Image (tube, helix red, strand yellow):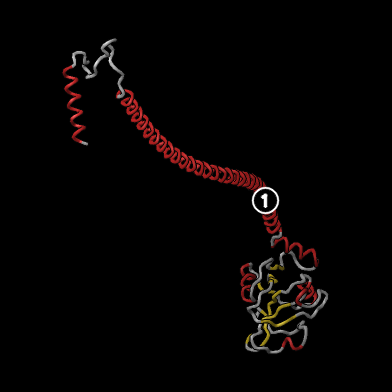
Amino acid sequence: MDDSIYANAAEFRMEESSSPSHFPTGKTRDPQTGTPPPSSAGPLRCYRLTAVCLGLLCVLLLVLCTALVVGRDQLQTQNDECAAENNQLHTQNDQLHAQNDQTMTQKDQLQTQRDQLQTQRDQLLAENNQIKAQRDQLLRENNQLRTESNQLLKTYSLEEQKVRWHFQKGYFHPGHFNISGYTLGTWNASRAYCQSLGADLLKVTTLEEQMFINGWNTPVWIGLRRTRSQWTWVDNTELSGSYWESAEESAMDVGENCVMSVVGELGRPMTATHTWHNYPCDFTAFAVCVKP
């Protein structure tokens, strides 16, 4: 069978080469009309080309579809990621808005507290200024009172005391008696005070003198003390008459060697006559001085 095919092909080639009306394409013309006979190879080649083109188009379409699907999936994924980021940003934005509102509320509260503190500070400053003004007023009044007190103390001088004592009793000579004013001292200090005035502690020899010192209504030292177990006056004369409050007061108590006339809050009333007490000499009282 193969040999017959090859033989037919050879005959066909010989006919084509010997035929005078053979076209360059190897086809013979129609001897009557001069047109080439119809050929079946042309449409087949067109079909093949069309099929190849369609195949290529299908491949391209498949590639494009695949690329579009992949691109769509990527875009969808990116869109989902963007949506998630957008939601996260919205959440953060809401949180920031909430924090901002909270911060604004705290700021308003702090401003309110600041205003209250400023008001309180102003009130305290006003009260402080008022207290300072009152303090200054009190200081001025205190200084004025001190000045008046000093003037009164100066006015209440020893000389005026002498005059007052003189007019109070009427039977003592002016300048004869003196008292230590507002100065409290021991028996020895009181005697030294009297001696600095050219006087000495009072020697009570009469009832008038006893009532005179009681008239001051305060405890005062008198010029009586115990020396060598004997009561003697500052002029070294022995005690004769006395105004002891009780017999026990004149007893020889150890350490109580000086005599004080005690009236007022600490002793007998001013109208009492017997007001003498023996005390330790380091006690303090006023001094009644008398000039010789």
* Vertical placement of residue 1 versus 266, above or below: above
Residue 90: give x, y in percent of width and height.
Answer: 54, 42
Other-residue count near label 1 (Cα within 10 Å), few / some / many at <14 / 14–19 / ≥20? few
From the viewer's perspective, tell me whether residue 268 is left or right of residue 97: right
- Kindly identify the residue that appears in the image at 67 percent across and 47 percent down: 123
* Residue behind mark 1: 131
**Nearer-the-camera pick, 143 or 239:** 143
Q: How many marks?
A: 1
Q: Quadrant of the N terminus?
A: top left
The secondary element bearing badge 1 is classed as helix
**Nearer-the-camera pick, 65 or 86:** 65
Q: Could you tell me the amino acid type at mark 1?
A: Ile
- Kindly identify the residue that appears in the image at 80 percent across and 68 percent down: 171
> Is residue 65 visible to us here?
yes
* Vertical placement of residue 188 versus 6, above or below: below
Please identify the quarter of the rendering in which residue 3 is found.
top left
Q: Quadrant of the C terminus?
A: bottom right
Residue 29: give x, y in percent of width and height.
Answer: 25, 14
Question: Seen from this angle, which residue lies furthest right?
Answer: 271
Residue 77: give x, y in percent of width and height.
Answer: 46, 42
* Vertical placement of residue 70 versus 202, above or below: above
Please identify the quarter of the rendering in which residue 239 is found.
bottom right
From the viewer's perspective, tell me whether residue 103 is left or right of residue 214: left
**Nearer-the-camera pick, 239 or 134:** 134
- Kindly identify the residue that appears in the image at 51 percent across and 41 percent down: 83
Please identify the quarter of the rendering in which residue 180 is found.
bottom right
Residue 145: give x, y in percent of width and height.
Answer: 70, 54
> Is residue 140 visible to us here?
no
